Image (tube, coloured by chain):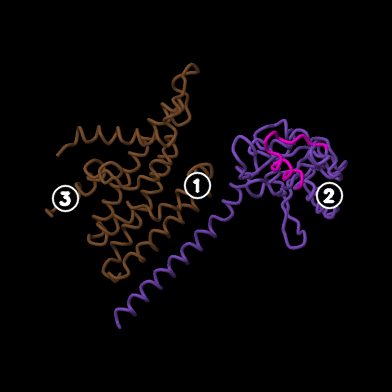
């Protein structure tokens, strides 16, 4: 592997390795929480926090953690941060917590978080791990926000709760259901491949 | 051998730190979470029942011990008199427990209103007990002392169509609550007076 610059560590999560589209990881929450912009954005922020914090700890402890029990250690670290997110969300943004529901605790087994811990943070230094987590998290947040916006605009005629088409608009309810998420995700993947072929 | 010890120690220390940290966060957020749950889960039902009260029933609340369980009562002040309380009771529905907020006038024992707080009933059927005002409005003005039953059981309540079990659960929950209401009534009145202005 050639040496990458620190900027590249950060920006790769935004385009080159943008999680849901390039790595095609973590699809389960993507399909479930992108019914609207707000929920997608909230989920993205929650995941970014967990990703950055767990990357920091995994990277800092990478010389102490014995390789045979590294996965249980990663899971403990990740689960701790997920529960913190869950509690904080309950305390401050209760309606968001209700809509995200089971998908917050499920971040524990989100393959992006574990994947970054295993593939990146356990081998790299602290600074690079933070940038990697931040980049991946922001990339994930952007993807979820865009997908959520598209589905909300067409499926409900609103964006972040604001009416945009006026009362005559007939909502395209297919978009807010699960098949709509697959179609939307597939189309976005296709468009990204069109522009980003290597 | 050294490997095994190291593994155990690392995992144990990590687990201990994680547990300790989470306990701290939980403690720090417990009060906030309780208020949020009141506001978003019970709040809408309480607000609707207590419409027109001059105080905030979510703030003016007290707890009473009923045997082993602790029950919360929310006080509504009307015309300067703290003569209304709301409390939550549970009935068995189709998909699990249904939380029912019951508002009652302490002078007459008449129901001021009823609202569903939490439930796991079928959307479109049992869930209408919460969403459809015509079902819950029936309870208004009825005396809490009498048992509540749906019409198929020979009672006075029109069940939500297609959701008899849910409706029975709501009635049973309210009927059950009249037991502890009667028992605690002197204490309720005493505590509620403190909020009169």
Q: Which residue is mark 3?
A: A5
User: Does residue A162 lie above or below B28 as drawn?
Assistant: above
Q: Tell me where the magenta segment starts and ends, as one range.
A: B156-172
Q: Mark 1 or 3 closer to N-term? A: 3
Give how far apart the Cα atoms at labels 2 and 1 are: 39 Å
Q: Which residue is mark 1?
A: A101
The residue depicted at 44 percent of the width and 39 percent of the height is A39
Residue A41 lies, in percent from the top left, at: 40, 40
- Helix, strand, or loop for circle 3? loop
Quadrant showing the N terminus of chain A: bottom left
The chain holding disc 1 is A
Residue B185 lies, in percent from the top left, at: 84, 51
Q: Which residue is mark 2?
A: B189
Q: Are labels 2 and 3 assigned to the same chain?
A: no
Few, some or many residues within 10 Å of mark 3 (<14, 14–19, 20+): few
B54 with respect to A156 (left or right): right
For chain B, give the colour: purple
Few, some or many residues within 10 Å of mark 2 (<14, 14–19, 20+): some
Magenta segment includes B166: yes
Q: Which mark is residue A113?
A: none
- Helix, strand, or loop for circle 1? helix
A185 with respect to B30 (left or right): left
Between residue A164 and residue B125, name the one nearer to us.
B125
Between residue A90 and residue A196, name the one nearer to us.
A196
Magenta segment includes B186: no
For chain A, give the colour: brown
Residue A102 lies, in percent from the top left, at: 48, 49
């Amino acid at each position: 592997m050639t040496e990458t610059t620190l900027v590249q560590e950060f920006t790769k999560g935004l385009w080159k390795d943008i999680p849901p589209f390039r790595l095609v990881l973590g699809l389960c929450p993507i399909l479930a929480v992108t019914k609207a912009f707000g929920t997608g954005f909230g989920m993205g922020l929650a995941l970014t926090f967990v990703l950055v914090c767990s990357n920091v700890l995994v990277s800092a402890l990478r010389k102490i953690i014995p390789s045979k029990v590294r996965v249980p250690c990663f899971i403990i670290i990740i689960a701790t941060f997920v529960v913190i997110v869950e509690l904080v969300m309950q305390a401050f943004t209760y309606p968001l917590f209700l809509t995200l529901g089971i998908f917050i605790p499920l971040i524990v087994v989100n393959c992006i978080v574990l994947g970054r811990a295993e593939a990146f943070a356990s081998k790299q230094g602290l600074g690079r791990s933070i940038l990697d987590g931040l980049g991946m998290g922001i990339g994930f947040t952007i993807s979820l926000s865009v997908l959520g916006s598209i589905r909300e605009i067409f499926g409900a005629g609103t964006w972040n709760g604001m009416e945009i088409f006026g009362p005559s608009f007939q909502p395209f309810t297919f978009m807010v259901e699960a098949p709509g998420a697959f179609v939307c995700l597939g189309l976005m993947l296709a468009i990204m491949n069109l522009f980003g072929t290597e | 051998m050294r490997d095994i010890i190291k593994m155990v120690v690392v995992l144990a220390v990590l687990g201990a730190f994680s547990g300790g940290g989470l306990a701290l966060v939980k403690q720090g957020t417990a009060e906030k979470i309780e208020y949020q749950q009141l506001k978003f889960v019970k709040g809408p039902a309480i607000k609707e029942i207590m419409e027109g009260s001059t105080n905030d029933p979510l703030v003016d609340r007290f707890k009473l011990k009923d045997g082993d369980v602790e029950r919360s009562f929310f006080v509504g002040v009307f015309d300067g008199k703290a003569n209304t309380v709301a409390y939550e009771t549970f009935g068995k529905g189709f998909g699990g427990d249904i939380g029912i907020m019951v508002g009652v006038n302490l002078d007459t024992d008449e129901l001021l209103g009823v609202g569903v707080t939490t439930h796991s009933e079928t959307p479109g059927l049992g869930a209408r007990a919460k969403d459809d005002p015509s079902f819950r409005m029936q309870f208004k003005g009825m005396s809490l002392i009498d048992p509540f039953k749906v019409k198929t059981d020979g009672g006075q309540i029109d069940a939500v169509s297609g959701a008899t079990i849910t409706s029975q659960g709501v009635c049973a929950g309210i009927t059950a609550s009249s037991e502890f209401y009667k028992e605690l009534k002197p204490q309720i009145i005493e505590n509620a007076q403190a909020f009169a202005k």
